[in-house]
Amino acid sequence: MLTTFPTDLGTLLSQATGGNLPKDTAISVLQEHEKDVMQFLTNSIEGNFEEAYAEFNEGYERMFTVGTALSSAIVTQMPDKFEDSKAVTPASDLRATFSQLLGAHFYYQTATSVEAYKAAAGEGGEAFEAVSEMQEANAEQMTAAVKSLYGQEAADAFNEIFSTQYEDSEALGKAVAEGNTEKVNEIMDNLLNTFAVDLGTLLSGATEGKLPKETAIAVLQQHEQTTIDILNSYVEGDYQAVYETFTEGHALMFTIGQALSGAIVQQNPEKFAEAPGMPETGMGGMADSGTMNWMLVTFPLLALAGALIFTRRKSLQE
């Protein structure tokens, strides 16, 4: 796992890019990726969830480093195909930042609901505190990103709205476990209508309409429905649906990141004047590349397997 796979794939990627992605670099970063996966799984099995999710977070970020290196090598190799553009620009950095933060957020929000359910249902939930803390830390990072772009007042407004989401995510898992249908419906309404509308309106206003309000609200509602569906599928024991919906929901976060970063670039062209944007790859850059999708989805899916299914089976066996 640490030798054969990284060496074979690293060699292949280096050769495919004409050496623009150095073989030693490719092998090294793939070995680090495999270590991330192994350490996450080991810590999860041993119940060291704080360490496990710290490893997950580091590993998830590493995949964006891999994506940047590979896309840069491909663009350097094929300047004509990409119209002499650059893979790494201020605009693409902005998109990657939002995609990374939003992708991690999706995992932590979903895991928080599931772990809260497990704890309330007496099925374990040992990872709840760890994933909840990671969700809050992720929210702080997003708030800081908003502040860097729009100032303290906007950041405070964002944080006030956003904090209701992860509070409701926890409450939803607990209410489902308790069979409190009235509370479940109330929380779902908050997530789908209050939160999505409030945040969509804020983001549209901040971007001066470059991100249309109706579009922002609709995609946020879709995101919230995805997290709700994952929790329900988990409760029903339909793990195939859990993974299928997770894959769709994770991809949606890149769509949101692309839309939001694109609106910000349009709003502030002078800040991104030196950035022609991401090279065309068919659907808008790194997040839409088949290779990158595979890399960016693999680690979260393995994490989902370790955290959601392993711990449930362990609790049932005990």
Image: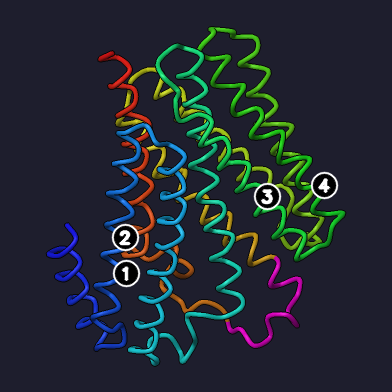
3D distance between C-alphas at marks 2 and 4: 36 Å
Residue to which mark 4 is pinned: 157
Which amino acid type corresponds to the residue marked 1 in the rendered image? Val
Residue at image position (57%, 62%) is 258
Find the magenta span and give its range: 264-276
Disc 4 + disc 1, Cβ < 8 Å? no
Residue 259 lies in the magenta stretch: no
Question: Which mark's residue is nearer the viewer, 2 or 4?
Answer: 2
Residue 280 locus on image (x, y percent): 46, 76
3D distance between C-alphas at marks 2 and 1: 6 Å
3D distance between C-alphas at marks 3 and 4: 13 Å
Disc 1 secondary structure class: helix
- Compare marks 2 and 4 and give the one earlier in the sequence: 2
Disc 3 secondary structure class: helix
Placement of 268 over or under 299, stated as above or below: below
- Compare marks 3 and 1 and give the one earlier in the sequence: 1
Residue to which mark 3 is pinned: 140
Which amino acid type corresponds to the residue marked 4 in the rendered image? Ala
3D distance between C-alphas at marks 4 and 1: 39 Å
Residue at image position (24%, 72%) is 27
Q: Quadrant of the C terminus?
A: top left
3D distance between C-alphas at marks 3 and 2: 25 Å
Residue to which mark 2 is pinned: 33
Q: Could you say which quadrant of the image residue 210 lies in?
A: bottom right
For residue 29, which numbered disc appears in the image? 1
Residue 208 locus on image (x, y percent): 81, 62
Q: Is residue 130 left or right of residue 246?
A: right
Residue at image position (53%, 66%) is 96
10 Å crowding of disc 3: few (<14), some (14-19), many (20+): some
10 Å crowding of disc 1: few (<14), some (14-19), many (20+): some
